[in-house]
Amino acid sequence: MPTPQDLQRLRALLAQLMAIGNVQRGELIRAEDWNSLVTAVTDVAQAVLSVEATPTVPPHEHLDQVGSAWLSQQLRDLVERGPLADPATQTRLLDLDQRLKRLTDRLDEMRGRVDEFRGRMTDVVTAPSRMLSIRVPICSTCASRWDRCSAISAASWKRPRR
């Protein structure tokens, strides 16, 4: 952003150029007009180059902002050294890590037990359907199952073929 001095300088250059800018075709360019034009162009070029060459804001301190010196010693140590610099905190973290591992192992064991229990329950639920597929002795007289046979003689029953 231009400073007030830069703006004043630009106004003076503009006034100089306006004064020599009303030349008509065929008029002579006088040496002093030519020199004024060259001076104005040179000043503009120098102003542009000085703006580009302006260094960035030098390092400085804002006294109204919080710094580490404002913090309590305990909090400053925590921020500067980190949470693992405190041996008690590190011990608590290791203890929590071990407890979490034990809990994970127990959960895995429980999952295995639940899967085993589900398998057993599936066996119990599907057992009656497997029992129906067992071959039952058939009566040779009436060709019905032995428990529905109307024949009295047990000698007339046939054993199923295997």
Image (cartoon, grey):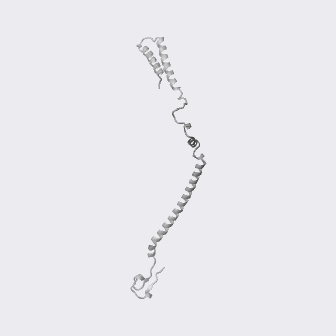
Please state which of residues 79 and 34 is positioned toward the viewer in this rendering. Answer: 79
> Residue 112: horizontal and vertical position, in percent?
52, 63
Please state which of residues 48 and 38 is positioned toward the viewer in this rendering. Answer: 48
Number of callouts in the render? 0
Q: Is residue 42 left or right of residue 90?
A: left
Please state which of residues 107 and 37 is positioned toward the viewer in this rendering. Answer: 107
Q: Residue at x 52, y 62 (%)?
A: 110
Q: Above or below — where is 73 with respect to 144?
A: above
**Res. 148 image quadrant:** bottom left
Please state which of residues 37 and 48 is positioned toward the viewer in this rendering. Answer: 48
Q: Residue at x 51, y 21 (%)?
A: 46
**Res. 155 image quadrant:** bottom left
> Residue 90: horizontal and vertical position, in percent?
59, 49
Q: Is residue 50 left or right of residue 140?
A: right
Q: Is residue 86 left or right of residue 158?
A: right
Q: Above or below — where is 122 with respect to 57?
A: below
> Residue 118: horizontal and vertical position, in percent?
48, 66
**Res. 103 image quadrant:** bottom right
Q: Residue at x 48, y 11 (%)?
A: 32
> Residue 13: horizontal and vertical position, in percent?
46, 17
Q: Above or below — where is 14 with respect to 108?
A: above
